[in-house]
Amino acid sequence: MTTLAPAPSAALPAKTNREVDTRPLLWPSVIVLFLWMIVPLAMTLYFSVIRYNLLNPALTGFAGLENYSFLFDDPTLWTSLWNTLVLVGSVLIITVVFGTLFAVLYNQEFPGRNIARLLVIAPFFVMPTVSALVWKNMMMHPVYGLIASLQSMVGLTPTDWFTDYPMFSVIVIVAWQWVPFAFLILLTAIQSLDSEQKEAARIDGAGPLAMFFYITLPHLSRAISVVIMIETIFLLTIFAEIYVTTSGGPGTATTNLAWLIYSVGLLQFDVGYASAGGIIAVILANVVAFFLVRTVSRNLQQG
Amino acid sequence: MSMPSTFQKPPRWIPVLAWVIAILIFFPIFWMALTSFKTETEAISTPPSLFFVPTMENYTDVIDRSNYARFVWNSIAVSFGSTLLALAFAIPAAYAMAFFPTKRTPSTLLWMLSTKMMPPVGVLIPMYLLFKTLGLLDTVTGLLIIYTLINLPIVVWMLYTYFKDVPGEILEAGRVDGANPMQELFLLLLPLAVPGIASTGLLSVILSWNEAFWSLNLTSSQGAPLTAFIASFSSPQGLFWAKLSAASLMAIAPILVVGWMSQRQLVSGLTFGAVK
């Protein structure tokens, strides 16, 4: 084993409590992540202050804040921010409420509990394009969808979900994927609840509701906040589900920030304008990330 | 309140409710599986056909007709390739931080985590142009690089938490016997940490397999993995639901099984160790 490369400074005095230079082990990861963090972001920032349209090469030069002022004057930006907020907010509420209720429910003893749990978490492992297409075609299609069939069976007019309730439909799909995530995390958290504490509360005469609000919910609070923050980061830039279902429409009804940037940048090729949108997305995500990192770091200090 | 037996039994409606909900949530996947064994006509019949003669036709069709093997291979290559690459970067880094922490270690870890917060759409345009310039658009290599980078922080974090749990005395003993850090890492730590490395790798494979932002934007045919291939069924010409179902089921089944088996370990990885 002498052929293995010795660590630079520790080759000779290897026996004692050595001072090892472990930086060569750490640096490759740090360097690639640093490049990944800095290079594309710097490019986005640079593109956002120049005139750059792939369809119009004659248009060049420094634009200052022109792209940004175009962006802020564009009603689509505000629509897309509102849609992002609606999508993220609704899905968060749905996933946290149902995730918590399901965690309590599936923490009870009942026959076949393990299999039932597997069924509930399954949608989380389904790739987004498959989830979206299954819902779009087989569930919510206005003619051949299962919901339409059920509706006509009871004499109702089938609903054209993606035309009449586009945002609602997207929310249903995304929530279906993320409720299992919240459930999985919260179920793990609820299992660490001290059974003696529960027992004591029961003996003191706490009913199921009191148990839930005074014992279970406080115990879950940190896990819930972790769920909220992780989901927010992913939900802020929901893309695939919109890509295969509504393409941001009808009109701009389901255009969120991610879709806006994609359509301006890669469909209309206005690089400068799309990059300004990208910077907005980065700023938004960073506000959320700030809180997430703070929570995790508190956790790190607790050991 | 004094009879212990009264509060042990949950009400009888609990199993019923739990099973109804579980079946409802799983139903779209079940329905898709069912549809994959129907003919195209049966797949779109109204009311939906519940009784039909199952056919394997869609599976053979998908496999024969649409270069399905290439998409499967691309998915395998990008998810396993990026996972191996990420492990190669992350194992030394996690080892260094877990066993030789400096006062900068916590902030390094947090900084790595923070790179994960970058919304992909914020850097979509430059990455697209960069890939175009470098000839990486629609290639497995390009996607593999991206997936390595986006999963590296999670992989480092998960390995770090696993390595922290390895008793230091074992490594200490090796050190006394004169093992250098490299020997310590490869001969002592890695064999002990195999379960942790395996579940870290699984999470990374699952995340890469299902990733659908970069694959949709940076690949179209040659380098496209299954996520992008399935998306091509969204075009309105023709209703190939049975074939879509067969292709989808084959695409999700392996990951679903892996996910089910490793759910417990996934929780700590997905929450960066905040929930265990």
Image (cartoon, rainbow, N blue to C red):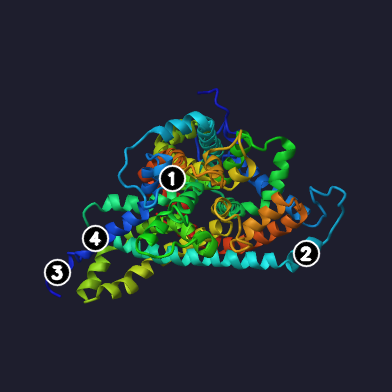
Please state the chain letter of the residue tagged with numbered disc 3 in the rendered image: B
Q: Nearer the viewer, mark 3 or mark 4?
A: 4
Q: Secondary structure at mark 2?
A: helix
Q: Which residue is mark 1?
A: B162
Image: B125 above or below A85 = above
Q: Residue at x 51, y 32 (%)?
A: B68
Dot 3 and dot 1 within a common chain: yes
Q: Which residue is mark 3?
A: B6
Q: Nearer the viewer, mark 3 or mark 2?
A: 2
Q: Check disc 2 and give the amino acid type.
A: Phe
- Tell me how far mark 2 sits from mark 4, CA to CA: 56 Å
Mark 2 touches mark 4? (CB < 8 Å): no
Front residue of this view, candidates B5 and A242: A242
Q: Which residue is mark 4?
A: B16
- Tell me how far mark 1 sits from mark 2, CA to CA: 49 Å
Give the side of residue A65 with respect to residue A184, left or right: right
Q: Which residue is mark 2?
A: A70
Q: Check disc 3 and give the amino acid type.
A: Thr
